[in-house]
């Protein structure tokens, strides 16, 4: 399993400034991936593509946006990968074939990529990358179905795992979510234009209205400004990714029909009820712990303050000094405010502990800044299992909670006390009516809706 695709997708139809608005949309989705970005636009005759590595703001300028002429566009922001040359893996992908030039953007991870790739290689297909998204595009182009729509459906019938997809040619735009609906995808409107985006925050930026989610298993086709929807794939239990609400999405987004800010506050509130801490101050680990810390502070009545300050301007090109300085890695990102912390008993709130290395360094830093007690509270359950559907979690042996219990983790990270939210409480916070099966919780309980293949 080479790829870890936490990504953002955005698409728009029927707009004279399609590429420009896609650029803005990608800006709003930058948190979903900072390694590479790209836009493919069409004027109804040809498809034009520009993609590169880096931040959205660095990749595009006015001339490039102008060169992406046309009324319809799709775009992608890509998270870092392990393995494979990332410049070749950046999206949108474009491929010529039976249906002319097609372009595709994908958020999620297929679980049977290797099997499909080997079958396609045996048929003589040459790939430029090791990306599962390129495999999907090749499957569509090689289909013998009578129409592009049927070719997409035929390809998706062979694909397993997670996909929120945008596919277009010079005439059509398709938006599709896998039958479990692992990854988010919403639809908005701006005048006659249809907009698709991983998160609703991108709709806000361009002044579009939020319409609804693309439903799990739904295929939406936009052609000459009219929409057709169908659910062509076998229905499956909806399993939207709970980690979108825990960590990944922006708090100002509506994801899976719910406000992310609201879920996170509720996680913090429940955490305070179950695991009070005898402290003077609530400190969020920014930015991921801020919304939950607010909930924790409101429910406990303990004041919250910004005892850790984050540097937002760390580029990907940051160079570590040769001689490593203790805690340098975390200090470049976070610095404690001694004035607030000195002599106080504090509780740190973060959304998750993954490897445990960050939390360990933060606790040490806060003690050095003069805290008399440092308690740690986490607004999700222990992360015990890897994700195979698109969230970048390390392999299982690197997840601290896969081999340590809470007591041992507490000793390891050096906190006075450590506590996590239960899965039940997390389910309540995200309004899972089934109390534990309405979302994908695999990273917390190992219950994989689609079995991961090797
Ligand atoms: P660590 O336990 O050292 O691996 O780091 C935990 C921190 O990483 C927490 O502050 C989380 O907000 C953050 N985090 C959790 N999941 C991810 C992810 N998939 N990608 C990047 N950061 C993450």
Image (cartoon, rainbow, N blue to C red):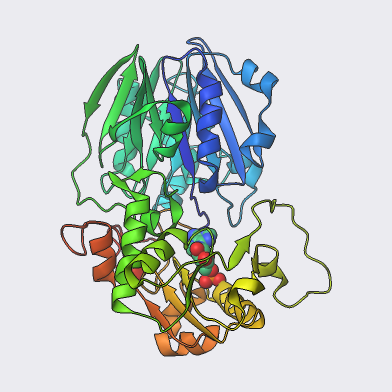
Q: Looking at the picture, how far across and down is residue 77, in whole percent?
A: 54, 40
- Asked where in the image residue 139 lies, by quadrant, the reply is top left
- Above or below 380: residue 98: above
Above or below, comparing residue 88 to residue 272 in the picture: above
Q: Say above or below: 166 vs 182.
A: above
Outermost residue on the left side: it is 434
Direction from residue 261 to residue 121 in the image, left or right: right
Q: Is residue 138 visible?
A: no
Residue 242 quadrant: bottom left
Residue 431 in the image: state x and y as whole percent: 22, 56
What is the x, y in percent for residue 319?
78, 59
Q: As rendered, which of 234 and 384 lies closer to the eye?
A: 384
In this rendering, position of residue 453 left or right of residue 424: right
- The quadrant the C terminus occupies is bottom left
Residue at the image position 74 percent from the left and 56 percent from the top: 318
Name the quadrant containing residue 243.
Answer: bottom left
Where is residue 353 drawn, in percent x and y?
47, 72
Q: Work out whether residue 323 can be spotted.
A: yes
Q: Looking at the image, which residue is at 53% across and 47% down?
A: 31
Q: Please, which residue is most extreme toward the right here? A: 322
Give whichever of 242, 328 is nearer the camera.
328
Residue depicted at x 23% and y 70% = 424
State the count of labels.
Answer: 0
Query: Closer to the camera, 260 or 304?
Result: 304
């Amino acid at each position: 399993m080479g790829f870890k695709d936490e990504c953002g997708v955005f698409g728009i139809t029927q707009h004279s400034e399609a590429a420009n608005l896609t650029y803005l949309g990608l800006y709003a989705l930058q948190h979903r991936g900072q390694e590479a970005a790209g836009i493919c636009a069409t004027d109804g005759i040809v498809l034009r593509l520009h993609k590169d590595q880096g931040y959205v703001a660095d990749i595009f300028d006015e001339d490039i946006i102008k060169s992406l002429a046309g009324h319809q566009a799709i775009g992608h922001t890509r998270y870092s990968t392990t393995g494979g040359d990332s410049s070749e893996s950046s999206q949108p992908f474009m491929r010529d074939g039976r249906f002319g030039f097609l372009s595709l953007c994908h958020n999620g991870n297929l679980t049977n990529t290797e099997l499909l790739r080997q079958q396609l290689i045996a048929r003589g297909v040459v790939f430029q990358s090791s990306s599962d998204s390129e495999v999907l595009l090749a499957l569509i182009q090689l289909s013998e179905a009578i129409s592009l729509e049927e070719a997409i459906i035929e390809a998706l019938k062979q694909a397993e795992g997670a996909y929120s997809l945008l596919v277009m040619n010079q005439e059509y735009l398709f938006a599709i979510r896998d039958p479990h609906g692992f990854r988010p995808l919403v639809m908005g409107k701006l005048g006659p234009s249809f907009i698709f985006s991983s998160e609703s925050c991108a709709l806000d930026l361009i002044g579009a209205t939020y319409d609804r989610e693309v439903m799990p298993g739904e295929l939406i086709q936009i052609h000459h400004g009219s929409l057709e929807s169908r659910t062509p794939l076998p229905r499956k239990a909806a399993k939207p990714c709970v980690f979108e609400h825990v960590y990944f999405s922006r708090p100002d987004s509506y994801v899976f029909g719910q406000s992310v800010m609201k879920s996170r506050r509720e996680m913090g509130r429940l955490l305070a009820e179950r695991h009070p801490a005898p402290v003077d101050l609530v400190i969020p680990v920014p930015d991921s712990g801020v919304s939950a810390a607010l909930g924790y502070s409101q429910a406990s009545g303990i004041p919250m303050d910004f005892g850790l300050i984050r540097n937002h301007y760390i580029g990907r090109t940051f160079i570590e000094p040769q001689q490593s300085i203790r805690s340098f890695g975390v200090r470049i990102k976070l610095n404690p405010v001694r004035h607030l912390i000195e002599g106080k008993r504090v509780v740190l709130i973060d959304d998750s502990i993954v490897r445990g290395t960050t939390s360990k360094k933060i606790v040490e830093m806060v003690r050095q800044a003069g805290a008399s007690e440092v308690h740690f509270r986490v607004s999700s359950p222990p992360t015990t299992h890897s994700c195979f559907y698109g969230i970048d979690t390390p392999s299982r042996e690197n997840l601290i909670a896969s081999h340590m219990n809470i007591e041992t983790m507490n000793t390891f990270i050096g906190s006075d006390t450590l506590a996590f939210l239960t899965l039940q409480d997390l389910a309540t916070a995200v309004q899972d009516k089934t109390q534990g099966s309405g979302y994908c919780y695999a990273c917390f309980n190992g219950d994989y809706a689609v079995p991961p293949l090797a």
